[in-house]
Image (cartoon, rainbow, N blue to C red):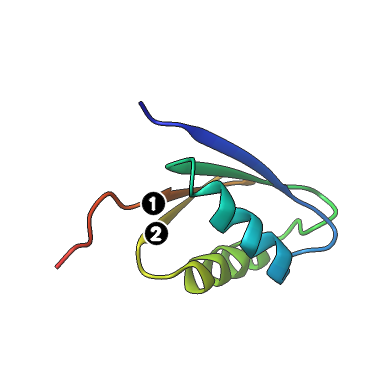
Amino acid sequence: MVTIGKVQLGKAGLTDNFIKTLENHFKSCNIIKISVLKSCCRDRAALKEISEKIVKSLGNHYNIKTIGWTLIVRKWKRVVR
């Protein structure tokens, strides 16, 4: 069964503490939905930069998808060779 965690990204933006929160969520969840609030950004280019920074800081074993103002981060089951 797939468990989905939910996190909000607010006016503090992308911080080290937020990345640690994501890593802790991935210990118990396979998918995390990140809702980007209005106070964080309302520009598509800024949202794309945020998603790239999240994937870069988490590592190679994660995939990210943007739907509206929600980022869906998925952990790979196996390492792709």
Q: Position of residue 80 (x, y in %)?
A: 19, 63
Q: Earlier in the sequence, mark 2 or mark 1?
A: 2
Residue depicted at 62% across the width and 38% down the height: 6
The answer to whether the residues at label 2 and label 1 have Cβ atoms under 8 Å apart is yes
SS assignment at label 2: strand
The quadrant of the image that shows the N terminus is top left
The quadrant of the image that shows the C terminus is bottom left
Residue depicted at 57% across the width and 38% down the height: 5
- Quadrant for residue 19, please give it: bottom right
- Quadrant for residue 41, please give it: bottom right
Tell me the tag on residue 62. 2
> Is residue 10 at all visible to an observer of this figure?
yes
Q: Tell me which amino acid carries mark 2.
A: Tyr
SS assignment at label 1: strand
Tell me the tag on residue 75. 1
Q: Position of residue 61 (x, y in %)?
A: 35, 62
Q: Tell me which amino acid carries mark 1.
A: Lys
Q: From the viewer's perspective, is residue 51 above or below residue 34?
A: below
